[in-house]
Amino acid sequence: MLALRSTTLPRTFGVTRQHESTACAAVLRSRGQEIAPRRTNAGRFTSRTQTRFLTRGIESSKGDRERVVVLGSGWAGYTLARDLDPKKYQVVVVSPRSYFVFTPLLASTSTGTLEFRTALEPVRSRRTKVEFFQGWADSVDFATKTLKVEEAVENPWQAMALTADGREDQNATQLEQEKGVKAKKGKVFEMNYDKLVVAVGCYSQTFGTPGVKEHAYFLKDVGDARKIRNRMLSCFETASLPTTSEEMKKQLLNFAVVGGGPTGIEFSAELHDLISEDMAKLYPELMKYYKITVYDVADRVLSMFDDKLAKYAIERFTREGIDVKTSHHVKSLRRGSPKKLEEDGGGQVVKDESSCYTLDLQEEGEVGVGMVVWSTGLMMNPFISKSLSRPYDIPVDSTVVETPSDEKSWNISRHPRSGGIMTNDRLRVIMQPSTQAKEGDKVSGRAIIKDVYAIGDCAIMENSAYPATAQVANQKARWLAKQLNRDTIDDNPFTYKDLGVMAYVGNWNAIMQSSGGDVSGRVAWLIWRGAYLAKSVSWRNRILIPTYWFVNWLFGRDISRF
Amino acid sequence: MLALRSTTLPRTFGVTRQHESTACAAVLRSRGQEIAPRRTNAGRFTSRTQTRFLTRGIESSKGDRERVVVLGSGWAGYTLARDLDPKKYQVVVVSPRSYFVFTPLLASTSTGTLEFRTALEPVRSRRTKVEFFQGWADSVDFATKTLKVEEAVENPWQAMALTADGREDQNATQLEQEKGVKAKKGKVFEMNYDKLVVAVGCYSQTFGTPGVKEHAYFLKDVGDARKIRNRMLSCFETASLPTTSEEMKKQLLNFAVVGGGPTGIEFSAELHDLISEDMAKLYPELMKYYKITVYDVADRVLSMFDDKLAKYAIERFTREGIDVKTSHHVKSLRRGSPKKLEEDGGGQVVKDESSCYTLDLQEEGEVGVGMVVWSTGLMMNPFISKSLSRPYDIPVDSTVVETPSDEKSWNISRHPRSGGIMTNDRLRVIMQPSTQAKEGDKVSGRAIIKDVYAIGDCAIMENSAYPATAQVANQKARWLAKQLNRDTIDDNPFTYKDLGVMAYVGNWNAIMQSSGGDVSGRVAWLIWRGAYLAKSVSWRNRILIPTYWFVNWLFGRDISRF
């Protein structure tokens, strides 16, 4: 642990307004598009007076409280915002989505075991005093403690996993092609903060695999879950048409899951449950065609579990007919049937190419599939990797320099592999002289930005190896809220307490690994359901979730598609 | 009542295959687009053997039952399909949507009082033996008792009100612009029927008012309800942004409802409930801006109710601040702000034009609105007005000629005003010689197509004045199913029993008019809720609906948007 040295730099290191706006115009925006010149410096935000005018709603209700601006409404941001004391802080959440997603239940909603909204909690609530602006953080000026926000109420990406893989500039064009929506720029407004918490999370990682970004189904947000549910049901409905050939039925009902982590495994299990419990009764003639396969590049799945539990899961899967293929590599994904079929087929065999997809595997070649669910890997949010990665002059009042350096240009310190923001053990953001930041680990200058914290998947605490999980995000948020509420942040560092891992493996069985020992089977399943119910945020969902479990067990899942 | 004369025409009147396919190629499709030449005659359905091959799934399970093909899954089609005896009939539903919508609850779902799926019942069900194909009926050959179906599983119009107003040919282009979806043709397959029931319903009528089709929000299907819910919530979220001017807040929160029938009134009431009960707590600072106005061209609203009850409803609305403007005419609807504001405004005043709409009224001029909900009028389904309106040679075996005529070309008899299919009092479809059909009422030739029935909004029983309501559709379907199950259709004609009308008018009050007398207020509301709960089709929804009523009363409606 490093001791803090509260050396404040002399005034000459202060950032200049001019430098700030030039730098800001040069960096890329959080969604990975260049800021159009018309919007950044000129016109709209000419005077600071006007900016204050724009946010006068929250100015007037602030009173003598400090303003904590929280960027993001995921496990880290939402938890922190709820836990902060509204008497002491005015909490303002800025997020492109208006709700928090209880991610462990997403797989259940994507198969209809639960209704979508049971996994959601709106950020605005009668019971909290949290202020909310739906927007993307654009850039932050640490010196003046202001940030620019681009509004995103009618953002067409809403509720969908965000992906980017080096072809980010294609986003806008693609969206136009896919959704026919003109990717408009939202208006930008400025806001002051007293404390800033960066909890913007990560994007989905596609490793640049061609076609994945365009054609795979993700499972990160509720819109993704809805897309999967509709797609899966429409694969069955299309397969039941008299115009669909035998070959095409097999392809449509061949479901591939890429990624053998808990999300991929739980989704496969839920999908299998849905098919064997409900679709079997509704489409009995199609049961001979369906297939679920889990692919992973690693040589094992569920790597966070003991060998014994992972083996138990795989055995269950094998018994249910779900294939698990490790050490498999996806080369590409595209619309249409595999080539050999296209060549064989005449009018009847190959359907219109939009009806199915072709997954190209290094080990197996082309496979025709109805849907590929991609649940592997995270990549850094461009807000971190682009917008916050520009050099800053170390500002006077807002920085505590622990190890001085002659360098005038400083960068936020980022994790060499993941690119996450490095924080100290109080979750405060660390800065390094720019030259060092580029070279990596050789630390000779080091500063802490006062009142700027980073938590969740976009942040990494130095000298720790905590995984990028909801549990870590949640614990960091709760710890930070508690310290800020009590002004005790300098007393003790954050430590993570591993509460164990669980995964549903299908047919009313789960696996659980914790300090209390390993559990598998029906008992683990009961604990799994109980834990999710207990962890549900609102009483509303604590009532609705068991109601849906009961109703769907009794009558079957709903298969209406809209 | 007309007595049936079972005169069967001689064989020479039989339709020829060649005539049939030429006529079919010439008529327009049910969605109002011309059949592409590539698909109609050539290629796909060259032999009857192949056709039988295509539907062999239902052929093999048919056994010795008669096949009843039901076109449509609304109040008429869905009810009939459920009520027919599966031991006696193989029931095959053909519909572009995979579910039935319990329409009286749509307004509740559009405001979040209920969840969308509580108003739905999937056509495929564990508990019924109904076969289902998701598709549009394309054309019917009464002589050979076959119909052509265009598959519609991935139909992008799914779950949305269908509109057409003389500019139908623009549909495909528009969809491409609005949703970025290529309006593909589905594949076509052929099916035989023993009995055919046409229950395809109506489209939404826009009376050719410019911009309504493109920019209004309808309330006919569950996708419409979802669109309204998202739009209304996003109007509030946008209005709460610091970048939104005072003038724009007023426009965004100005909600217009066109049509003072039960749907328009109930939606206005539910919207007002949502705003006053929930949004008031979440966006207190916006309450001064919102406004709801109901417009109707007629000089009164709720015309199916007594004056006294209608007055009660209007008084309640006035007290709640909802304006009811009768004798008002909509000239057009467009994106953007009213002209006077656009001219005034500089950078800040007028937002990007997609943010609001301008409603142009003959009586008031341009009004800026956040959303226009259009719930007035029905228009004939193009399947009726186009595909079925072609001349047929009276076929031999499938027609009962009641009043003979020398004419060889016959048409389905259609209602002169609405264009609906005329049926006799056994709900069988009537044909007239083509010359007469054009001239209207002078009946000298008349035939009945054996085994073809028409029910629901697309059908009108001769010598009756039953309204185009769910109640009539439901009663016709139940009656028809009963007669077909018992083979008693020739015994007695269908008669409609008016069970009364109800409407929710907001703040836990309703109005009810029936033979038992008029009721209004809280008691009527209790009956209203009780009746809808009792009429709900499935036990699943009988559990979920009161759960949502309770949960939303206790915790407020969910405002998550996705």
Image (cartoon, coloured by chain):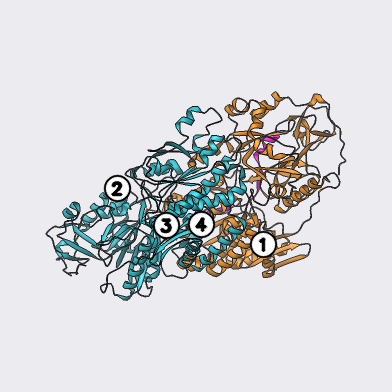
Chain colours: A orange, B cyan
In which chain is the residue bearing label 1?
Answer: A
Image height of A539 relative to B175, above or below: below
Secondary-structure class at tag 2: helix
What chain letter is assigned to the residue under label 4? B
> Which residue is disc 2 drawn over?
B37
Q: How many marks?
A: 4
Question: Secondary structure under badge 1?
Answer: helix
- Asked if the residue under mark 2 is in contact with the one under mark 1, i.e. CB atoms within 8 Å, the reply is no
Spatial CA span between label 3 and label 1: 47 Å
Dot 4 corresponds to which residue?
B116
Magenta span includes B500: no
Q: Which mark is residue A286?
A: none
The circle drawn on residue B309 is 3
Q: Choose between B287 and A396: the one closer to the eye.
A: B287
Q: Which residue is mark 1?
A: A533
Label 3, secondary structure: give it: helix
Q: Answer whether residue B407 is visible to the viewer in this image.
A: yes
Q: Looking at the image, is mark 4 or mark 3 earlier in the sequence?
A: 4
**Labels 4, 1: one chain:** no
